[in-house]
Image (cartoon, rainbow, N blue to C red):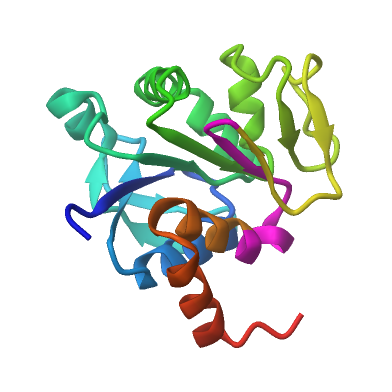
Amino acid sequence: MGDKKRIAIFLATGFETTEALTTTDILRRASGVQVDLISVHPHKTVFSAHGVVVIADEIISTIWNKDKGKSYDLLVLPGGDIGTSNLISCEELKNMVVSFLDDPTKKVAAICAAPQIIGLLKKADNREIAVYPNRLNWLENSVTYHDRPLVISDNLITSPSMGSVFKFALSLVELMVGKKERIRIEDDLVILF
């Protein structure tokens, strides 16, 4: 298969636990990917919206100073109201997202409230976006959906909530390493709904 696809999942205080950790778990099961948890804070310890403590693999300033995140193929933005607000406060992350969305060889995935970041950065105009209901800030020039578990618009992948996280994460597996690997993981998970 060659080099592994590199995925960065960004954690900010108040992130939605299920969206970040289920996505991490499913992606780390896939052959051919490397998943790094990146704190947007100057420390690796990050608290979720429900008090789950996660130790990130790295802090954003390290990857920003190394190569501005260009060694990654996919950036993942978990939601949560507080988590999304804290992601918005991170200038390095916003710069990476803009750079990735401007590069057709890179991908950005956002779930729940996090697609608002794409709107804030003026990268959601004329795109279809799945987003949590009533979290429509900066998305007025987008076509938004709350009832679709996944929307892919060019190199942007969005999903509306933690209720769609399995579809979201499995779709990221398929986009990164193919349908065969997604099916293998899906079968291993014995998803019953």
Figure check: 145 above or below 32: above
Give me the residue at 21% from left, 33% from top.
Answer: 63
Left or right of 21 on screen, residue 64: left
Quarter of the image holding residue 144?
top right
Give me the residue at 75% from left, 21% from top.
Answer: 139
Image position, residue 19 (x, y; %):
57, 57
The boundaries of the magenta stretch are: 154-167
In the picture, the quarter occupied by the N terminus is: bottom left
Left or right of 146 on screen, residue 18: left
Quarter of the image holding residue 59?
top left
Q: Nearer the viewer, residue 19 or 100?
A: 100
Q: Nearer the viewer, residue 67 or 106?
A: 106
In the picture, the quarter occupied by the C terminus is: bottom right
Give me the residue at 22% from left, 35% from top.
Answer: 71
Q: Is residue 156 magenta?
A: yes
Q: Does the magenta stretch include residue 155?
A: yes
Image position, residue 132 (x, y; %):
77, 43
Determine if residue 28 is in view: yes
Left or right of 135 on screen, residue 187: left
Give me the residue at 17% from left, 55% from top.
Answer: 2
Image position, residue 154 (x, y; %):
58, 31
Q: Nearer the viewer, residue 162 or 164?
A: 164
